[in-house]
Amino acid sequence: MPVRTRFAPSPTGQLHIGGARTALFNFLFSRHHGGEYLLRIEDTDRERSTAANTQVILDALDWLGLSPDQPPVFQSARQARHVEVAQQMLDRGHAYLCFCTPDELREMRERAVAEGRAPRYDGRWRDRDSAEAPPGVKPVIRLRAPQTGETTVDDLVQGSVRVANSELDDMIILRSDGTPTYLHAVVVDDHDMAITHVIRGDDHMTNTFRQIQIYQGMVWELPRFAHLPMIHGADGAKLSKRHGAVSALEFRDQGFLPEAMCNYLLRLGWGHGDSEILDRDEAVRLFDLDGVGKAASRMDFSKLLHINGVWLRQGDDDRLTREVIQRLAAMHGLHADAIGETRIRALMPGLKERAKTLVDLSESAAFLLRATPLQFEPKALALLTPEGKATLQLVAPVLAATDFTAPALDAALRRFAENAGRKLGQVAQPLRAALTGSTMSPGIDETLAALGRDEALHRIALAAA
């Protein structure tokens, strides 16, 4: 049977970074084995599931390059099928009607807590006749779970995991209002979608034991299960807002590239030798579940920044220029015309060498679009001393007589510095301040060339005055 995986988020909020990694592993596993990767939106929580949240998930997956091979399946649209299977289990004797009242269930829980036991249904309607049902009580349908022996998960990550059936109670598969429970709906959907491998977080392990019993009750073939360890913060605690960004789109907004994000998430709990920087094709070629570790991973934001910086330096300059232009408009209201776009594109090779995020890159490029007179940073203003301004006045005519290409400008500045008996930095520092309003930029020759003769000389004259 061809490999089929699925990512099944609930649209009750953002796509958490742990969910993004789960989607990535499902995608890579299916691609590695020549199969299909599907998406199911588990929107049965009608109060919290919203169209806006669904769109956020779709946007995040699209940004990460993890869009499914088929249109998404919406679990809420399949309720009739879930009810049908529950009725089949009831007809086959693998499920039964339970007429417990809310008061009985509350009393059951309170007694278990008082006796130091885990609250569980006690099976009181398991073998009773429905004719004994109290009037006016709508029944639920409960799974008739085995009470002896054990249920085993031969997990592709965690190994063989067992639980005694006596530890599992008869869970509800259909509520009294006719709606399915999550645990039941998932099994029906995975079976109908022909999912061969269920790859999800290890917080679902207990659910898996229960769901296997539904498969067995329907005499359906089990998929293979793989439970991924959780992602923790650097302190070992559950990852949360206090550790930093936790949703995929937050990382996008903070200037991370999707390929860097996927590269980092791939290495967060999976390894292949010393390989660190992996593109999508290489990840598909190498990825399999035998490389996934059993222990929880720790989010390392410094490592993510490093990987993002590597991908930025390797990035296509035209694409990075478009990203920067969009961010400068959104962040600072700076809009690039054709001249501004040309300046940014010309200086991109130098700008991206120092940047760790698209935010850094955009901030460092902002001076190319700013109107004059520039607002000077304090350190830049400190360079515009009387001596600094005099240097600008002397170097301006030299630059004006130079072919405005980076090599020619570099040679002219070096000759000027040598003739003036100065170090090149003593000339470049006030020039950089005049041109950018700051003390940081790519090489001064590249910066001059990107601004162009007229704009560069205009900025120098304003600063010298």
Image: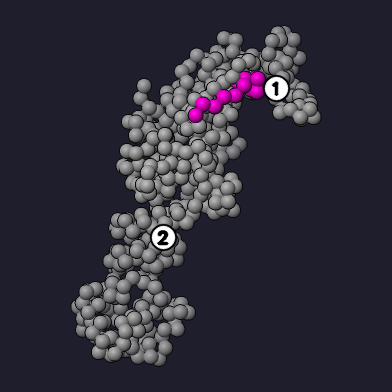
Q: Is residue 441 visible?
A: yes
**Helix, strand, or loop for circle 2?**
loop
Mark 1 highlights which residue? Answer: 121
Instruction: Name the disc covering residue 398, or none.
Output: none
Task: Give yes or no for residue 167 being in the magenta stretch.
Answer: yes
Q: Is residue 217 above or below residue 327?
A: above
Residue appearing at x 48%, y 47% in the figure: 248
Amino acid identity at mark 2 = Lys
* Residue at horizontal 60 percent and vertical 24 percent from the top: 163
The quadrant in which the C terminus is found is bottom left
Q: Which residues are magenta?
A: 159-174
Q: Identify which residue is drawn at 74% across, 17% down.
A: 136
Q: Which residue is pictured at 57% across the width and 24% down the height?
A: 162
Q: CA distance from mark 1 to mark 2?
A: 54 Å
- Return the residue at label 2: 356
* Residue 457 image position (x, y, % from top left): 30, 81
Identify the residue at the far front of this view.
273
Mark 1 closeness class: few <14, some 14–19, many ≥20 residues within 10 Å? some
Q: How is the image coloured?
A: one colour
Rendered-image quadrant of the N terminus: top left
Q: Is residue 285 magenta?
A: no
Secondary structure found at label 1: loop
Residue 328: % across, % down: 41, 63
